[in-house]
Image (cartoon, rainbow, N blue to C red):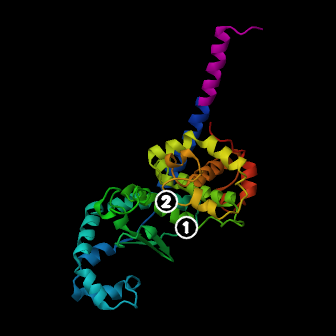
């Protein structure tokens, strides 16, 4: 039977309705989950140590040390802290932090929903006391989780173009903005749940970070994919447009099961660009291995019935084989 225009239109209409139904069902499910998450009671205790230090005088030092001993290492004499309390640059840093984060509400708007999402997917999660501080712009340790305390160096989130960040590489400062605080905190907690790779293969490493980014999908539903991985929108677009070519490069060069330690610096660690040793290098963002690991983990969760807890411990080889991953063309 020959297909007429009416037949073709009817078939197309049928498939469009099916697709619409699937999308509607998926959206309804997501909306239901989000409503359940919103009901989870969550109190976040925030201690603004940055404010307390900024308001203190040398006479207040003994009381401050007694109240927050962890922030005053014993190997440093009181003269060091007295000098810092009166240091002009420190005062400027404190003023800038206060301008960006004047009230706790800005932090609560990020941390409360984040912790609710963590609690939903990991019911044994217990909230920690959040302590904010200044860190002399220690961007390598922006967020630290130690026992029951989460320490956030707010001076690392003043804005990518802030004058205090002059001299720091742009691939680092692009993540030093208020909107990156949530993804950084999520990353810190994600690493508490993900099993470390049992082997040093490139595949094992990129899937570890893929799991981390997948948790950000669940925990930060209102954050863009670009911010989850620490890309600009342009960098994320580049990764999407070149996904097939990157994957082909990794496969053809037999990198997936390689244990070459240099692959971390080339494709996993934060860097101004990835190193294919091709002309495209300068156009590419860093961490493209993490990006592909994320895509593989997403494919695995779409094609397998499994829990998030099971995902955290599954071995890389099994995950990859059952992901049915196909690069976006």
Badge 1 density bin: few <14, some 14–19, many ≥20, Cα 10 Å: few
Q: Give the range drawn in magenta.
A: 1-19
Q: Quadrant of the C terminus?
A: top right
Measuring from the top left, give residue 92's x and y in whole percent: 23, 69
The answer to which of 303 and 75 lies nearer the viewer is 75
Quarter of the figure with residue 142: bottom left
Check if residue 51 falls in the magenta segment: no
Measuring from the top left, give residue 202's x and y in whole percent: 67, 59
Badge 2 density bin: few <14, some 14–19, many ≥20, Cα 10 Å: many
Q: Residue at x 24, y 67 (%)?
A: 95
**Kind of element beneath mark 2:** helix
Measuring from the top left, give residue 315's x and y in whole percent: 72, 60
Chief secondary structure of the magenta portion:
helix
Q: Which residue is drawn at 68% across and 8% down?
A: 4
**Residue 115 visible in the shown view:** no
Measuring from the top left, give residue 113's x and y in whole percent: 45, 57
Give the residue at the far right of this rendering: 1
Residue behind mark 2:
116
**Residue 278 visible in the shown view:** yes
Q: In which quarter of the image is the N terminus?
A: top right
* Left or right of residue 96, residue 137 in this image: right
**Kind of element beneath mark 1:** loop
Above-or-below relation of 195 to 307? below
Quarter of the figure with residue 262: bottom right
Check if residue 18 falls in the magenta segment: yes
* Labelled disc at residue 125: 1
Cα–Cα span, label 1 and label 2: 9 Å
């Amino acid at each position: 039977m020959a297909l007429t225009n009416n037949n073709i239109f009817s078939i197309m209409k049928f498939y469009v309705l099916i697709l619409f139904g699937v999308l509607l069902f998926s959206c309804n499910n997501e909306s239901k989950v989000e409503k359940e998450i919103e009901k989870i009671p969550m109190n976040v205790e925030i201690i603004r140590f940055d404010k307390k230090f900024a308001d203190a005088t040398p006479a207040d030092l003994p009381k401050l040390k007694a109240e927050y001993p962890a922030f005053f290492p014993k190997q440093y004499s009181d003269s060091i802290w007295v000098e810092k309390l009166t240091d002009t640059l420190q005062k400027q840093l404190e003023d800038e932090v206060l301008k960006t984060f004047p009230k706790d509400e800005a932090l609560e708007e990020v941390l409360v929903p984040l912790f609710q999402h963590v609690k939903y997917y990991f019911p044994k999660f217990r909230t920690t006391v959040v302590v904010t501080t200044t860190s002399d712009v220690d961007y390598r340790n922006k967020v630290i989780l130690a026992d029951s305390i989460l320490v956030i160096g707010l001076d690392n989130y003043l804005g990518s173009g802030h004058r205090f960040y002059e001299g720091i590489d742009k691939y680092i400062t692009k993540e030093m903005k208020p909107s990156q605080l949530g993804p950084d905190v999520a990353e810190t907690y994600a690493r508490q749940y993900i099993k470390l790779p049992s082997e040093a293969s490139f595949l094992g490493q990129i899937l570890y970070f893929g799991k981390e980014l997948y948790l950000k999908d669940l925990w930060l539903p209102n954050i863009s994919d670009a911010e989850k991985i620490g890309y600009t929108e342009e960098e994320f677009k580049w990764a999407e447009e070149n996904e097939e070519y990157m994957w082909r490069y990794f496969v053809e060069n037999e990198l997936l099961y390689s244990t070459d330690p240099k692959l971390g610096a080339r494709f996993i660690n934060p860097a101004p660009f990835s190193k294919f040793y091709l002309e495209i290098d300068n156009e590419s963002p860093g961490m493209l291995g993490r990006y592909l690991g994320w895509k593989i983990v997403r494919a695995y969760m779409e094609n397998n019935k499994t829990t998030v807890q099971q995902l955290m411990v599954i071995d890389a080889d099994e995950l990859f084989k059952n992901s049915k991953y196909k690069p976006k063309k």
